[in-house]
Amino acid sequence: MLNQWFPNVKWDKMWEATNETLYMTGISTLATFILGIILGLLLFLTAKGNLWQNYAINKVISAIVNIFRSIPFIILIVLLIPFTKLIFGTMIGENAALPALIIGSAPFYARMVEIGLREIDKGVIEAARSMGAKTSTIIWKVLIPESLPALVSGITVTAISLVSFTAMAGVIGAGGLGNLAYLEGFQRGRFDVTLMATIMVLVIVFIIQFIGDIITNKIDKR
């Protein structure tokens, strides 16, 4: 049945492209989660009235986040070609897409982390400070646990965005479903290949959203 509807699809290439997309999305999501939390914490803690209040550092970090968050992803890939070649020696392949994916998404997630931290009741933080808790204790025992539902919800949205970023990266040789849809589908006039690659991307997105919703609902105590 599938061969009748998708006669031009080579299933071994489709599964290989799907694995490449999952690889790029998984690695970049993990790195984005770590870097985004670090940047988000710095933005929150150095803001006025918080533990590490520092106007200059806060504005510098905020400017860096805003700049990289504002650059269109396809342009960011081109700008990072020298950096990518320095690290991997090439700009082609799934690994070569990782720097742009991470640098493009971490600032976006950092803002979501900052927003989640701002929603924490100030009284909870002040209570921990009044009991003599160290900054590290406040971060690990108060800030992160209290904002965890927002952090998980934010990384879910970011991971879905990363799936679309991998598709764009695929157009310029990063591999994955985007590359397959463009080279094997669009350029050769094989609509069924493009359609199947699109369906696979949608399946990945739905799975990410489903898992994210389950985790968020389990940890949200409100």
Image (spheres, helix red, strand yellow):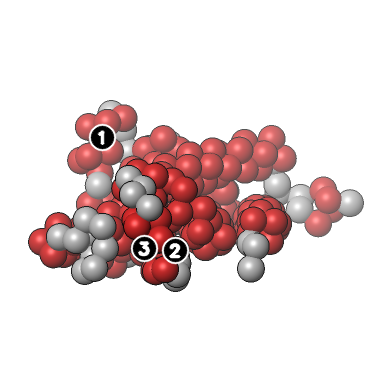
Closest to the camera, between mark 1 and mark 3, is: 3
Residue bearing mark 3: 126
Residue 88, percent from left and from top: 31, 30
The image quadrant that residue 215 belongs to is bottom right
Q: Which residue is mark 2?
A: 124
Residue lying farthest front? 131
Whether residue 222 is visible: yes
Farthest residue, direction left? 56
Does label 1 or label 3 sit earlier along the sequence?
Answer: 1
Q: Amino acid at mark 3?
A: Glu
Residue 14 coordinates in the image, percent (x, y) = 66, 42
Decide: marks 2, 3 in contact (CB < 8 A)?
yes
Disc 1, SS: helix
Labels 2 and 1: the sequence-earlier one = 1
Q: Residue at x 42, y 68 (%)?
A: 123
Amino acid type assigned to the residue bearing label 2 in the image: Val
Q: Which residue is mark 1?
A: 85
